[in-house]
């Protein structure tokens, strides 16, 4: 399923382990060479690595757990990009 950046930001994310809404995704961080998703950024400026993101269902983002929410400097792969 192809989606535009503007269709993916502003969508809510759900925490699967807590079965509740976690907030809104405000930014996507993409690998500039491959175009792959590297991380999601939430409205609370927390970061979520792509490994913690379930396959996109089209309506909201599913995140494995609340422990996947990281502070900006904690995600090493983003600093490499």
Image: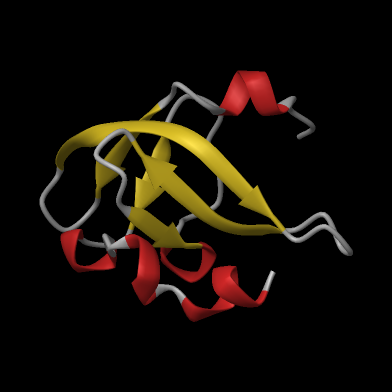
Q: Position of residue 57 (x, y in %)?
A: 53, 36
Name the side, left or right, on which 73 lies relative to 57. Answer: left
The location of residue 71, given as percent across then percent down, is 28, 63
The quarter of the picture where residue 8 lies is top right
Farthest residue to the right: give it. 33
Q: Position of residue 1 (x, y in %)?
A: 76, 34
| Total labels drawn | 0
Vertical order, 68 against 21 (above or below): below
Left/right of residue 72 with respect to residue 71 in the rendered view: right
- The colour scheme used to paint the residues is secondary structure
Q: Nearer the viewer, residue 75 or 6?
A: 75
Whole-percent x, y for residue 44 in the image? 24, 39
**5 left or right, relative to 51:** right
Is residue 51 positioned above or below 27 on the image?
below
Q: At x 30% / y 51%, what residue is drawn?
A: 46
Residue at (16% x, 58% y) in the render: 17
Kindly identify the residue that appears in the image at 52 percent across and 37 percent down: 27
Question: Residue placed at 58% from the left, 43% from the top?
Answer: 28
The quadrant where residue 68 appears: bottom left
If the image is split into quadrants, where does the C terminus sit?
A: bottom right
In the drawing, does residue 76 fall left or right of residue 14? right
Image: 67 above or below 27: below
């Amino acid at each position: 399923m192809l989606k535009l950046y503007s269709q993916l930001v502003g969508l809510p994310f759900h925490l699967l382990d807590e079965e509740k809404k976690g907030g809104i995704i405000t930014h996507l961080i993409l690998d500039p060479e491959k175009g792959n998703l590297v991380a999601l950024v939430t409205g609370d400026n927390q970061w979520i690595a792509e490994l913690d993101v379930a396959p996109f269902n089209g309506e909201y983002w599913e995140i494995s757990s609340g422990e996947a929410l990281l502070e900006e400097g904690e995600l090493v792969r983003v600093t490499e990009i």
